[in-house]
Amino acid sequence: MTSAPPEPIPAADLERVRSGAQGLIGYHVDLDTEDGSARITLEIAEQHRNRNGTLHGGIVTMMLDAAAGFSASRGAEGAGLVPVATVSLTTNYVAPAVSGVVTATGRLSGGGRSILYAGAELRDETGALLASASGVFKALRRKAGA
């Protein structure tokens, strides 16, 4: 079965790619970077904390996945945002975050037309590393005639 290339979404049209999860958690996406990286920021609030009072690990992974995924999406075809799906994501937790703003920065590290590799780091306001992730992403292609 043949696949048509994915339709890129202009990076300036972020509202079109806003997810329900993004709205629920309240993180912000920044693609206004020259180097193709993607930044996801979140101001930690009570609803983001686990029972120990630190930023929930699921939210940490969500932010790393979004940052790496957006950087893969930007690098898939070179223009606009190509829809991608996470194939695998490995997260390493380094230190907890309790308050303030945290930023996940994702960068494309390799790949081809359909499989892309990207990583991300989550840092606090002082620049301290909180977590890192590496992922594999697949560019989503629409079926011919669809």
Image (tube, rainbow, N blue to C red):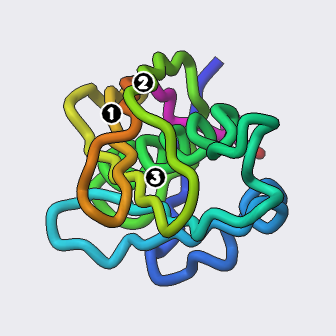
Query: In the image, is 143 to the left or to the right of 118?
Result: right
Q: Determine whether 114 is above or below 73 in the image.
A: above
Q: For marks 3 and 2, give the CA distance.
A: 12 Å
As drawn, the label of residue 135 is: 2
- Residue located at (39% from left, 62% from top): 39
Does residue 26 belong to the magenta stretch?
no
Q: Residues within 10 Å of mark 2 (few under 14, many from 20)?
A: many
Say which residue appears at 29% left-offset and 42% top-offset: 129
Q: Mark 1 touching mark 2, by CB under 8 A?
A: yes
Please provide percent x and percent y for residue 131.
40, 34
Secondary structure of the residue carrying numbered label 3: helix
Q: Which residues are magenta?
A: 136-145
66 left or right of 128?
right
Tell me, for residue 70, which label it has, or none: 3
**Dividing the image into 4 quarters, which one contains the N terminus?**
top right
In the rendered view of the protein, which quadrant contains the C terminus?
A: top right
Q: Is residue 139 magenta?
A: yes
